[in-house]
Amino acid sequence: MTTHNYLLEIGLEDMPAHVVVPSVRQLHDRMAAFLKDNRLAFADIKEYATPRRLALLVSGLADKQTDESTENRGPAMKIAKDADGNWTKAAQGFARGQGGTVDDLEERDVKGTPYVFYQKNIIGQPVADVLPKVTEIIEAMTFPTRMHWSHYDFEYIRPIHWFVSLLDDKIVPFKVLDVEAGRTTQGHRFLGHAVDLQTATDYEDALADQFVIVDEQKRGDVIKAQVKQIADEHGWRIVLNRDLFEEVTNLVEYPTAFAGQFDKKYLELPDAVLITSMRDNQRYFYVTDHDGQLLPDFVAVRNGNREYLENVVKGNEKVLVARLEDAVFFYEEDQQHSIADYVEKLKTVMFHDKIGSMYEKMQRVAGIARYLGKRFDLSEAELADLDRAAHIYKFDLVTSMVGEFPELQGTMGEIYANLAGEKEDVAKAIREHYMPTSADGKLPASKIGSVLAIADKMDTIMTFFGAGMVPSGSNDPYALRRQAYGIIRILQDHKWHFPLLRIQAAIVSQFQEKNQVPHLHLDKVKGLNDFFVDRVKQFFSTKDTRHDIVDAVTANQDVDPEDMFAAANVLTDQVDKESFKPTVEALTRVLHLARKSKDAGAQVDPSLFQNPSEQKLHDAVETLQADAPQLSIAELYQRLQDLRPIINEYFEENMVMDKDPKIRDNRLHQLAQIRDIAKFFGNLDGLIVK
Amino acid sequence: MAKKLDIQDMISTLQHFWASKGCMLMEAYDVEKGAGTMSPYTFLRAVGPEPWNAAYVEPSRRPADGRYGENPNRLYQHHQFQVVMKPSPKEIQEYYLDSLRALGIEPLEHDIRFVEDNWENPSMGCAGVGWEVWLDGMEVSQFTYFQVVGGLNVSPVTSELTYGIERLASYIQDVNSVFDLEWGDGVLYGDIFKEPEYEHSKYAFEESDQDMLLKFFNDYEKEAHRLIKLGLVHPAYDYILKCSHTFNLLDARGAVSVTERAGYLARIRKMAHLVAKAFVAEREKRGFPLLKHAQENAAKEVE
C-alpha cells in the first residue's frame, strides 16, 4: 500500500528560547494522538524547531483511515417494540441517533435478554480528507505565556504568520485566523527568502539552502563544533553550560560562533561577577585556561553567517565592557562602606510587608541560630562565629552589586565579608545560608552555614505561617515547601535531631520574650507539623522506602525527621525477617487496646494486679522505660521485640477489658506505656505484614 | 554606514519612516513622565476599541537613575522614540527592521535578535508580551504587544516600539559616552544636557523638599480622583502623571520605605485603572469617533 509524507510547519514571530523545544514535543504528542484517534497509521514523526517555527514531518502515513465496524446496543426488545410488534419511539430514536433507520436494527441476545443492535461500518476516509482537521491540534497547543495580537480573541505563544501543510506534493488546506496553509515557508530573516516547497520531504534541505538549520539537534551540533574549533585554536577551555547552550541554540536559526575579548584589568572583578555578566546578561560562554583560570575572552553565537562578523564582535565587546565598567564601579563603591552601614540600611528593607524588615529578620534568626547551634552541640567558638554571621548575613542585599545582579546575593556577601576581614567561616556561612536553592541543590558544606540556613528558613516558614500566608495547592509563591524540604535535607546530612514541636515552642517563646513579631499570632499557628511531615514524605519518596513504612513512621505526632529516618531504616531492615510478623502483631494489639486508655501518662498501680504475668510485664516495661532515652532506635526495636513473649503471655493470662473498671483502666495504662515507648514507629498497625 | 547620523537626523529619519507607515507624528507630551508609555498618546489610546497609530519623541525622567552627569550611560532624563500601532499590524516586526535599515543599520552587517522580555509597569497596571531587540548584543529597543493597560484587558492589541535614542545613537555614532553624542549642527549632547543632568541629580538626591512633595502627592491624588468623578479624563490623567513623577522624586530621595512603596504604587495603579475606564466611557459617549473614521476609510477603499 502506498504511504505518504506529511509536513506541518507553524511559522511564528520569535518565540522565547525556552519554549521552543517543549512546544515542538507537545506538537509531536498531539499529532501522534490525532493520527491515532483518526485511525491513520504512520511510521514516524520527526520534529523540527527554531525560534520562528515548529514543524513535524510524518512519514509512512497511511493512504486512508482503517475501516471500523462497531456494534452499538440499543434498548431491550421489550422496550423497542410495542405489544403489536411495531417499533416504538425509543427504537426509532436510537436508530436515528446512530445515523440509520429502524430497518437497520438487528436483534441479539445479551445474557438471555433480547436487545436491538445497530451495526455501524465506518469506511476509512482518504488521508487528505482527514488532515485538514489538524487545526484542532494547532489550536489546542498550550504555552507558559500566551498573548493576543491585532484584533483577535485567539491566544498563542506569538503571532502566527504562516502554515506549511503538504501531503507529499499537495497542499492540505486549512485556515486559522487569517492564515491559510500553503507550501510557502520563510528562510532566515536576513540571509534567506521565502521558498515554495515542492514536496514535504524537501523541507530540511530547502531550508538549509535558505540559511535555516531546522533540526534543533543539528543546530546544537554545529554550535558545539564551532565552539570547540575556537577553543582548540586558542588553547582555551570552554564549558558549555547546558541551560545556556540550549538557550543559544534556540535563539538562532543559523549559528555562527565567534570570539571576543575584553581588557585584562576587568579580571580583577570576582569571577562570579564576570561569569554572571557574560553568561546571564549577555548569553556568552566564558573562557578559561586549562587550569580553570578565567581569561579576558568570551565566545558568543550570532544568528547569521561570517559576513561582517567584525561588526558583531566589536559591538558585543563594547556592550560587555560597558557592563563590566558598571560592575567595577559597583565593586569599588561597595567597598567604601562598612558592613555595619549596610546592616543599618537593612532596617528600611522589607522582608515582607506583613512581617517586618530584613534587619528584624536577622535579629530573630540570630536567636534561633543560637538556640539551634547549642542543640546541635556546636563549640563555643563555632557559636561565636554563627552569632556574628547571623547578625550580618543579609547585608549584601543593599550593596550596589547585588542591586544590579540579584543572582549574586550571598556570593557577593561572602566576597565582601572576606574583604572586610570577617572570618572565613563567617563569610562562607553568608553564602551558604541560601542553600539548597532547589530540591536537589547543593547543601551547605560548613556546620555554621548549615545552622544558619536552617534558622533562616525556619524563621521564614514560621513568620509566613504566622502572617497567614500558608501554601495551598500549587500556590506557594514564597517557596516555603522548598525551604522546609531544604531544612530536612540539611538535618539528614548532619544527622541532627529536630523535635519540631519543641523547637517551634522555643522559637515562639523567643519571639514573645523579645517582642519580635508582636503583630503575628505565632502561638496560634496550626498545620506546621503536617507541613513538615509532608516534606519528610517527599524526602522518603527519593529513597525507595516502602510506602507502608513511610506511612507508619510519619504517623508519629512528635515530628523529628531524624527519628523518622532511623525508624524507617530499622523497619526496612526488619521487615523481611521471620520475627517481624509476630512482633508487629503483638505491638499492634497493644496499640489497638491502648487507644481505649483515656488518661495519658497515668501511673500503673501494682496493687491492682491479679496475676504474675502482669507484674512480669510491668517490671519489663519499667526497665525498658528507664533505658529508653539511651537507646538507639534500632536497639529500642530489639528490646520491644524481646518484650514479645511477655506481652503474649500477658494477653493469654489477662482479659484486659475486665468488668471491674479499676482493673481495666490499670491494664490499659500499662499498655499505653508500651505504646509511648514504641511511638517512634508510628502507626505500626498500618504495616503490610506477610 | 555612509554618514553617521546625528541625533536630530536620527529622529527625523524615524519620524519620516513611521509617518510612511501610517503613524501620526505627535509631539512630546508636556507633563513629566518616566516613559513614553505614560504619554496619553499611548496609555489612554491603548484602551478601548478605537484604532491609533502614532509616533513621537518622549523625554523620560527617572530621578533615581540620575548620576550627576558623571556616568557615561545613566541619565536622569533620556529620550525615547515611541511608536504605537493599534491594532498591531501583521508586518510590525518587518517595519521595525526596515526602520533600522532607514537608520543605516543593515541587518546583514549585524546580529539582530528578538530576545524574550515580558514588560510590566505595575504602577500603571500595564503588562505586555514581547522582546528586547538586541543589536550586536546591545538592547536598543523594547518591543511589546500590550495585553493589559490600566488594569483593563485590551482589544484590539496595541504594538509598542520604544527606541532608546541615546543607546542607538551611541551605537550609530560609535561613542562610549552619551555626552559625546552629536545632537545636531555639531553641538554635543553634553553641551546641552550635562548641566541639567547635574542639577536634576543634585535636586532629586539632595535638595528636594520631601514635605512639600508628600503634600503635592496627596493633593494631586485628590484632584485626580475628583476630576475622574467629573468625567474630566485628560486633566485627571495629567494629575496622575504628576503623582507618578512626584513619587519617583520621593523615591530617589530615599523618602519612601519599602512598605510605603507598595502602598504608593497601589494608589497610582488605582487611579490609572479608574482613568482608563473613564476614558473608554467618555469615548463611547462620543461614539468612538476614530472607529467610525477607520470604518469610513475602509468603506472608501472597497468602493
Image (spheres, rainbow, N blue to C red):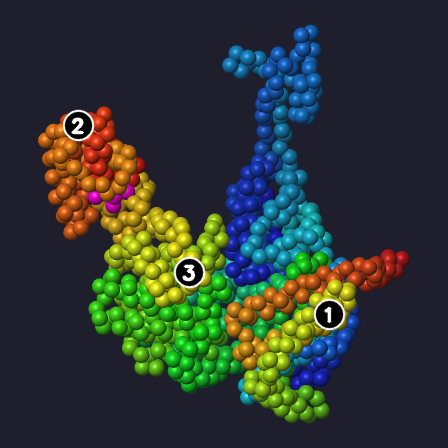
Look at discs 2 and 1 and give the one toward the viewer: 2
**Disc 1 and disc 3 on one polypeptide chain:** no
Q: Amino acid at mark 1?
A: Ala
A260 and A323: which is toward the camera: A323
A338 and B82: which is toward the camera: A338
Question: Residue A655, image x and y in percent?
Answer: 20, 26
Residue under the image location 23 percent in, 72 percent down? A381
The residues tagged by marks 1 and 3 sit, at their Cα atoms, a distance apart of 41 Å
Answer left or right for A480 relative to B196: left
> Which disc is residue B190 wearing?
none
Question: Residue B118, image x and y in percent?
Answer: 58, 64
- Chain under label 1? B
The residue lying furthest to the right in this view is: B303
Residue bounds of the magenta highlight: A676-682
Label 1: which residue? B236
- Chain under label 3? A
Residue under the image location 41 percent in, 53 percent down? A524
Q: Is residue A480 above or below residue A191?
A: above
Q: Residues within 10 Å of mark 2 (few under 14, many from 20)?
A: some
Residue B5, quarter of picture:
bottom right
Please tell me whether the stretch drawn in magenta is mainly helix, strand or loop. Answer: helix
Secondary structure under badge 1?
A: helix
Label 2: which residue? A654
Label 3: which residue? A463
